[in-house]
Image (cartoon, rainbow, N blue to C red):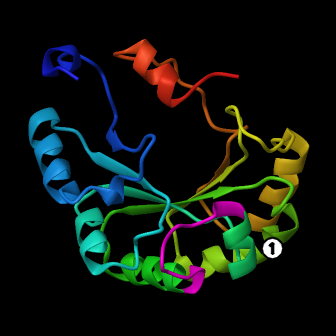
Amino acid sequence: MALEKMRGVSANYATFSGMGEPTLASNLGQAIELTRAILHLPIAVLTNSSLMSREDVRQELALADIVVAKVDAPTEDLFHQINRPHIKYTLHEILQAIESFRTAYGGKLALQMMFFEANTGCAAEMARLAKTLSPDEIQINTPLRPCPVRPLSPDEIASVRGQFVEFHGVMTVYEAKRLEVTPLDLEATLRRRPKL
């Protein structure tokens, strides 16, 4: 995207996310530093957490102001069923890496947890798991964009949220304030994030 399009645009963060996993970029750290220097904005990175077991990935993520790490399952079997990972790391290794990252990281760590029928019954286990990771925020989501699984209703998500009562900074996809956003490139945005 041309820098000229970004000038004068109001933004809270420059966010690394999208159709690919940001931590796959071998130059993520350089991209974070360059983006911050040009845009003078805090940096957020949304990661599926699959490569957080790598020390170099954790070091580069530590350059961001906010890291949103995805955790959707409390067990190895459910992790494979939901996420279908193509990595050599186990869920246990990934969770240990997130915990290690949390202890050294000075920025804001958020956990993004996606709930749907397959893992709804694991909400209490997910809350216990979150407690060991000590996030600053927990985002409870359900798929609202085109997806092969049915999203949970607001009542079902409220029931899941009830398992996280001891946490501060919990929000659900249904509670989140919807901001009016004007994409810089509507066609490219709709390719990445189609509407229902």
| Vertical side of 195 occupied by 66: above or below | below
Q: Inspect the magenta stretch and tell me whether residue 84 lies in it.
A: yes
Asked whether 6 or 179 is in front, the reply is 6
> How far from the left and from the top, in percent, is residue 96?
49, 85
> How far from the left and from the top, in percent, is residue 48?
50, 59
> How far from the left and from the top, in percent, is residue 38?
10, 35
Q: Which residue is tagged 1?
A: 124
Q: Is residue 81 left or right of residue 48?
A: right
Q: Quadrant of the N terminus?
A: top left
Which segment is the magenta one?
Answer: 82-92
Given the image, on which type of amino acid does mark 1 rest? Ala
Q: Quadrant of residue 150?
A: top right
Q: Quadrant of residue 30?
A: bottom left
The rendered magenta stretch, by its main secondary structure, is classed as: loop
| Vertical side of 33 occupied by 60: above or below | below
Asked whether 22 or 153 is in front, the reply is 22
User: Which residue is depicted at the point 77% across and 77% down?
Assistant: 125
User: Which residue is depicted at the point 26% across and 45% down?
Assistant: 42
